Amino acid sequence: MAKKDIYNNSVNIFILLALFVVSCARMGTPDGGAYDETPPVVLRTNPAIGALNNDKKRIVLEFDEYVKLQNASEKIIISPPQIEMPEVKTSGKRVIVELMDTLKPNMTYSIDFGDAIVDNNEGNPMGQFAFTFSTGAHIDSMEVAGTVLDASNLEPIKGMQVGLYSDLSDTAFITKPFERISRTDSRGHFSIKGVAPGKYHIYGLIDSDQNYFFNQKSEMVAFMDSLVIPTSEMAFRQDTLWIDSLTIDTIIDVPYTKYLPDNLVLQAFKEENNIQYLLKNERLTPNKFSFYFAAKSDSMAHIKGLNFDLSSDAFILEKSLHNDTLHYWLKDSAIINMDTLEMAITYLCTDTVGKLVPQTDTLYMASKKTRAMIQKEKEREMEAFQKELKKKRRRLKEGEVLTDTLPPTKFLKIGCKGIRDVHATLYLDFDEPLARIDTQAIHLRLKVDTLWKDIPYVFEAVEGHTRKFRIRAEWRPEKEYQLEIDSTAFTGLYGLHTNKMTQTMKMRSLDDYGTLAFDITGGNLAKGAYVELLNNQDKPVRRETIDRGHVEFFFLNPGKYYARIVNDVNGNGKWDTGCYADKLQPEQVFYYPQVLDIRALWDMRQDWAVDNQNLTKQKPLDITKQKPEKEKEKRSRNAERERNRR
C-alpha cells in the first residue's frame, strides 16, 4: 500500500474516532419518541363481563399492557356496597378484585373503576370502565345519573356516596345500607349502574363511619322529595369518520341506549348540630374564664363558685348570640388572685335518647398565665426599659439633660380602622370590657374650608358584642372628617384608659362609584330573599333585600363582583340548613352565572331569570373552588419531549 493511501486511511480513522468521542460526550435525555397515548385494553376477564349465575368472588381482568391503579379508594365503587372492604390490586397486566362479603342471590353486581385503571408507563387512563356480573339469570342494566352540589354555595361535592333504596320508607336511609351506590367525581357527577326497573328514593351521604346509611349528625346528606323511576330510550349521537388527521370523511348518527333520569340535582347539607354538651372550658388569664358549648341554647348555663363567691357584681358576662360561648370577666381582685377557681356549672346536656336534661359538672380552673408569670413579664419589660435608658444616657452630649426617665404609660388598646366609603360604618374595638365611657371626649369633625367643625354622630354598642361599638354619621362624598378621642374617653375594666387618638378620613367622590341593579324573575322567592354581592373568593361584601323583584346596590367601588340569591324563607336574615327527620330541604341558593364588571360612573342594570339555567351551570368557574380534574395533556408532554431533543 502506498504511503499516501496509508496516510488517508489514518486521517479517516482519526476523524471517525473524533466524531464518536464527541457524540458520546453530548449528554442528554434519551429520545424514546412520542409519549404513548393509547389507554389499556381489556383482553379477557374471569368471570366474563356480564356473566350470569356467577358464584366467583375473585374477579380477574387481563390487559394488553402493564397497568396500575390511581386513587383506587376514591374512584372504585362496588354496588351493592360491601360492608367488608374488598381487596383490589394489580399484578403485572392484571387487576384482581377479591370480594369479602357473601354474594347475594339474584343480584346484579357492578364494579365501577371510573378512570382508576391507567397504563404503567405514561399513566393513560382507561376511561370510565365498569365490570358487571349477576348471581342470577339476568343483568339489571338501568342507570341513574346526576350531580351533587353543596346547598349553601352550589360547590360540586367530590367523593360523596349517592345511593338508591327500593324500600320507600323514611327509615330506610337511617337503618339500612344503600341497595345500589355510586360516588361523585370532581365535577360532583355520579352514575349509579346495574339498577333494576322500579321506584326508588335517592340520597347522598358523606359516610364518615362507612356503614352506608345516615346515622351521625356530622355526616353531610342530600335527599330528593320525589321518587326516581329509571327508564331508557333510543337516542343518537354524532360520530366523525376521518380520512386523515385533518380531513373529515363523514359524520354519522350512531344509535345508543340513553338511560334516564340523567340530570338529577341533589343539594347536600349538614344538619344543625343540636347535640348539646360542654365542649371546652379554659382560664387563659387570671381575670377571665370561658365556656364553649357544642350547640346553641335558648337557656344559659348557671355558674356557682365553690371556693369563692361569684355574685352578679363580681363579673361582666360576655356571651354569644345563642349562648354557646360564655366569657366571664372577673371584677373582684380577690377572685382574680386565686390560683385555682373551684366551681359547679349546670347546663342542659343531650342524654343517650336525645333529650335535653340538666347536668352539673364540678370544675377546677387554674390560670394558664399565673401571677408569677405576669410579674416576670413586668420585670422583663422594666429591665428592657432600663437598658434602653442607659444607652440614651451614653449618647448624651455635654450639657444635655435626659428628660424622659419614666417608664412608658401602658394604655388600653383601641382598634379603629378608618373608612373612605359613604355607606360604611366606623367601628371601635377594645381588648377588654369597658368600665367607663365618656362620650363628651369623642369628637367628630367635618372640614369646612380650612376649619374643623363639630358635627353630630351616634355612638352605640354593637348588638351581641360587649367590646365593640360603632359611630354613625352622615358621611358626604369628597368631604374630609376627623375623629378625635381624648385620652380619658374610655376606661377598661382593669383600670387602663385609652391614649389620645386622632384619625383623619376623606370620603370618596361619587364619581368613584358605580351602581348595580337586578330585575329578578322566577325562583318562587320568599319575601325575605336577599342578594349578596361576592368577591373573587366567594365571600359576601354587600347585601340587599329583594323588593318586589328588584334590588339595587349604590356606591360600589369599581371592580369585579359575583352575585347570589339566598331564598330566606323564614326571614331570619341568614341561610338555614335542612333536616332529614323533618323532611326539610335547606334554603335555596342561586348564582348569577356571569362576572359583573363594575366601573366608576356606570349604572349597570341586569335581568336575572333565576330558573333559566340549571343549578349545575349557575356558579361561575372563576369562584368555584372544586374544579374539574383536567385530563392528561399528552400533546403538551410530547411537545416538551420534542423541545428536549433540540
Image (tube, grey):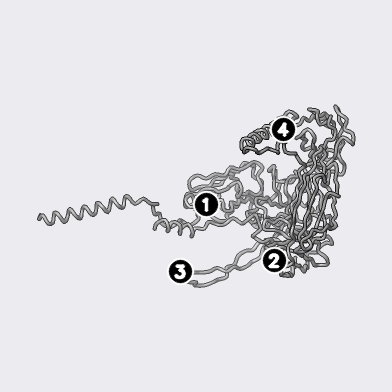
Return the disc, 4 or 3, that comes first in the chain's sequence: 3
Residue found at the very far left of the displayed protein: 2
Of the pair 316 and 389, the residue shown nearer to us: 389
Q: Residue furthest front?
A: 399
The residue nearer to you, when weighing 33 against 405, is 405
Q: Which is more N-terminal, label 1 or label 4?
A: 1
From the top left corner, tell me how far across and down residue 628 is, in percent. Answer: 61, 56
The tag earlier along the polypeptide, 1 or 2, is: 1
Q: Are marks 4 and 1 in contact (CB under 8 Å)?
A: no
Sooner in the amino-acid sequence: mark 3 or mark 2? 3
Mark 3, secondary structure of its residue: loop
Q: In the rendered structure, find residue 598 and report the number of the disc placed on it.
A: 2
Rounded to the nearest angstrom, the CA distance separating label 1 from label 2 is 46 Å
Q: Check the picture and name the quadrant holding the C terminus.
A: bottom left
Q: Which residue is mark 1?
A: 118
Q: Name the residue type under label 3.
A: Asp
- Label 3 crowd bin: few (<14), some (14–19), many (20+), radius 10 Å: few
- Other-residue count near label 4 (Cα within 10 Å), few / some / many at <14 / 14–19 / ≥20: few
Q: CA distance from mark 4 to mark 2?
A: 53 Å
Q: CA distance from mark 3 to mark 1?
A: 27 Å
The residue pinned by badge 4 equals 378
Q: Amino acid at mark 1?
A: Val
Foreground residue, 459 or 453? 453
Mark 1 vs mark 2: give the one in front: 2
Q: Which residue in the structure is indicated by mark 3? A: 244
**Label 1: element kind:** strand
Which residue is drawn at the image coordinates 64% and 60% (left, top)?
621
| 330 in relation to 552, above or below | above
Residue 112, given in percent of the width and then of the height, sits at 60, 52
